[in-house]
Image (cartoon, rainbow, N blue to C red):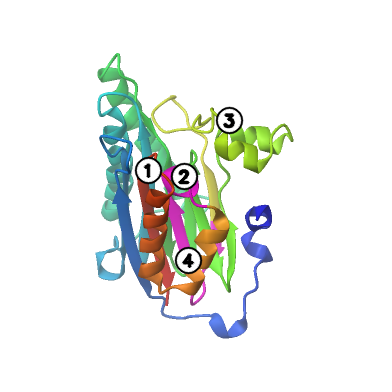
Amino acid sequence: NPNLNKGSPADMKIPFIKRVKNLKIDSVFVTDVGLKRSNNEDSGISVSGPESPSGTQGVFIVADGMGGHESGEVASSMAVESLLGELTNMVEDITIPPGGYSELIRRMVRNANAKIRKAGKADKPQSMGTTCTACVVKDRKAHIVHVGDSRAYLLRDGDLRQLTEDHSYVAEQVALGRMTSEEARVHPRRNVITRALGTSGKVECDIITLELFAKDIVFISSDGLHGLVPDIEIKQALTDLPFKKGVSWLMNRALENGGTDNVTIAAGLIR
């Protein structure tokens, strides 16, 4: 159902009774090499509570690397390690920029871009790059920074919304009306992305900030998942099954549907 991708978090119903003062999060992270690849170029993390960096309630990251001879693995792991390291080492009294906490995370992602870019140049002729979709939960808000075609979704009251826009060739064609969503799913250039970390000296990041409420699910996936499993099934699994079982079902579903790419999910259920 293409309508599942429409709308924004602001469009979603927010019942008064769902406000939570002391936010708690159940987190899950799963990754699989898939059935067609020899190595896993995805990286990610899903932490919450005491395991989360100081000052945060949860961190969820998915990075999907690209580049030959293990360069993709290096790039994606560098993105996750760089971002998590900066969050962990951040002092409590750090000055928040005018753009807010999300702008601070965007700067961290840009720092990761510079590190990956530098490593890629040192590793010539092998270039490297990675997507990066990260959600940091702080003060009952989700701060999401996004580059590439991994995705962040929000499930609220049975409604699934894709929060991020794919930075990809086919997404651009769909936006221009030159291709349908159904055609994009099977197009030969569906894996061509238009933004990535490490491929340019500067990177443009999308930022999204929204308040979180009890029973919300933040769900981040690499394209090995949402490229093979339609949104309606993501919605049904997260709605009809217990949280962690729903995530496991979706992983297995991607493998059942061919497992043509690495599959990674980082998700959090707000208590």
Residue positioned 45% across, 68% down in the render: 139
Horizontal and vertical percent for residue 59?
A: 36, 58
Residue positioned 49% across, 77% down in the render: 214
Q: Is residue 224 above or below residue 11?
A: above
The quadrant holding residue 247 is bottom left
Q: For mark 1, does the 10 Å Cα neighbourhood hold few (<14), some (14 to 19), or many (20 or more) residues? A: many
Amino acid type for the residue under numbered disc 2: Ser
**Residue denoted by label 4:** 237
Pointer 2 with pointer 3, Cβ within 8 A: no
Q: Is residue 56 visible?
A: no
Q: Residue furthest top?
A: 125
- Which quarter of the figure is the N terminus placed in? bottom right
Amino acid type for the residue under numbered disc 3: Tyr
Pointer 1 with pointer 2, Cβ within 8 A: yes
4 or 3: tag closer to the N-terminus:
3
224 in the magenta segment: yes
Please tell me the numbered disc located at residue 150.
Answer: 2
- Which quarter of the figure is the C terminus placed in? bottom left
Instruction: Give the magenta range.
Output: 209-229
